[in-house]
Image (tube, rainbow, N blue to C red):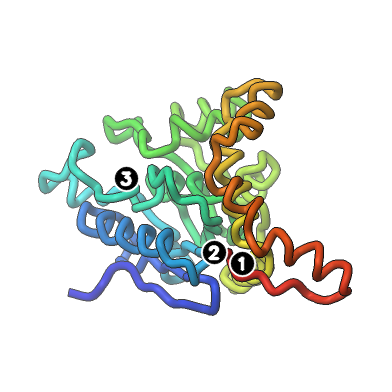
């Protein structure tokens, strides 16, 4: 059986391609494999950014594999490290992830997108949650993240009615950063990834660590959390070689040579 998760290293960037035709649906085995891939990405100091996409131009991911569900798989099963899709609950992943949504993102496919930090979407992409028509609940990130990202009533409309949201509207609500023609999705994601890969990796990781760590805190308490040294990546960044390299390169009028240490 072929690997449902393809990977390609492009310098500091890891591309993760969900390749499980016909709909890139995710069963337990695929989710476990995705968790392995993202944990390897997390632990590899030579990789600084990841792109997650689906194979083809029609479907990013149909989410939970309903045929597998009908065959006995259920939501209480162990979906591997990082939860469903290997990324929806990978709490210690501080490296940036870009979702390159090349087509339809349904249910769990939308939840993969919601777990990413930046999103590039095809003009033909659509997002929706069909769970209420399936006797289910989108609990791999939709009910947790969607109402925090867009107005509560819009999120509830999507979750309760299952109505489809097109890419342009998703961009207008802030769910998507860039909307491009279908044949430019991966190219745009790579452009963004390469820009990130030229930045200081500890800075990127510290930003993600702190932003997630201060969610729900008042502004004053968020400041205090940083002053108290609660964020190890941030503290590591402050004493790193890269922290000195950035200002030095600026004064010497050259590009910085960041090393992640």
Q: Which of marks 3 and 2 is nearer the N terminus?
A: 2
Q: In this view, does 201 lie to the left or right of 145?
A: right
Residue 80 percent coordinates (x, y):
25, 50
Measure the C-alpha gap from mark 2 to mark 1: 6 Å
Pair 3/2: label in front: 2
Q: Name the residue under label 1.
A: 193
Q: Mark 3 points at which residue?
A: 83
Would you identify the image quadrant in which residue 215 lies?
Answer: top right
Q: Which of 8 and 136 is in front in this view?
A: 8
Q: Nearer the viewer, residue 70 or 32?
A: 32
Tell me what residue is drawn at x 67 percent, y 47 percent: 171
Q: Nearer the viewer, residue 33 or 235?
A: 235
Q: Which of marks 1 and 3 is nearer the N terminus?
A: 3
Whether residues under marks 1 and 3 lie with C-beta atoms below 8 angstroms apart, the answer is no
Q: Name the residue under label 2.
A: 49
Q: Is mark 2 on a helix, strand or loop?
A: strand
Q: In this view, does 255 lie to the left or right of 230?
A: right
Figure label count: 3
Mark drawn on residue 249:
none
Whether residues under marks 2 and 1 lie with C-beta atoms below 8 angstroms apart, the answer is yes
């Amino acid at each position: 059986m072929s690997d449902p998760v393809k990977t390609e290293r492009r310098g500091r960037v890891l591309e993760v391609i969900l390749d499980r035709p016909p709909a890139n649906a995710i069963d337990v085995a695929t989710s476990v494999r995705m968790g392995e891939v993202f944990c390897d990405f997390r632990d590899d100091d030579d990789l600084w950014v990841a792109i997650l996409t689906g194979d083809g131009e029609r479907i990013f991911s149909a989410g939970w594999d309903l045929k597998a569900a009908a065959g006995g798989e259920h939501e209480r099963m162990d979906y591997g490290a990082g939860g469903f899709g290997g990324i929806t609950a990978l709490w210690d992943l501080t490296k940036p992830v870009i979702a390159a949504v090349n087509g339809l993102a349904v249910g769990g496919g939308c939840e993969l997108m919601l777990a990413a930090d930046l999103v590039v979407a095809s003009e033909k992409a659509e997002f929706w949650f069909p769970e209420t028509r399936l006797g289910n609940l989108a609990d791999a990130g939709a009910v947790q993240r969607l109402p925090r990202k867009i107005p509560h009533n819009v999120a509830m409309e999507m979750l309760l009615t299952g109505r489809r949201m097109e890419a342009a509207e998703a961009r207008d609500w802030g769910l998507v950063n860039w909307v491009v023609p279908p044949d430019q999705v991966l190219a745009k994601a790579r452009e963004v990834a390469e820009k990130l890969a030229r930045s200081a990796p500890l800075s990127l990781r510290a930003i993600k660590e702190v932003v997630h760590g201060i969610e729900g805190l008042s502004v004053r308490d968020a400041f205090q959390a940083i002053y108290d040294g609660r964020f190890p990546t941030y503290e590591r960044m402050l004493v790193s070689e890269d922290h000195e390299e950035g200002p030095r390169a600026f004064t010497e009028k050259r590009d910085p040579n960041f090393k992640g240490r």
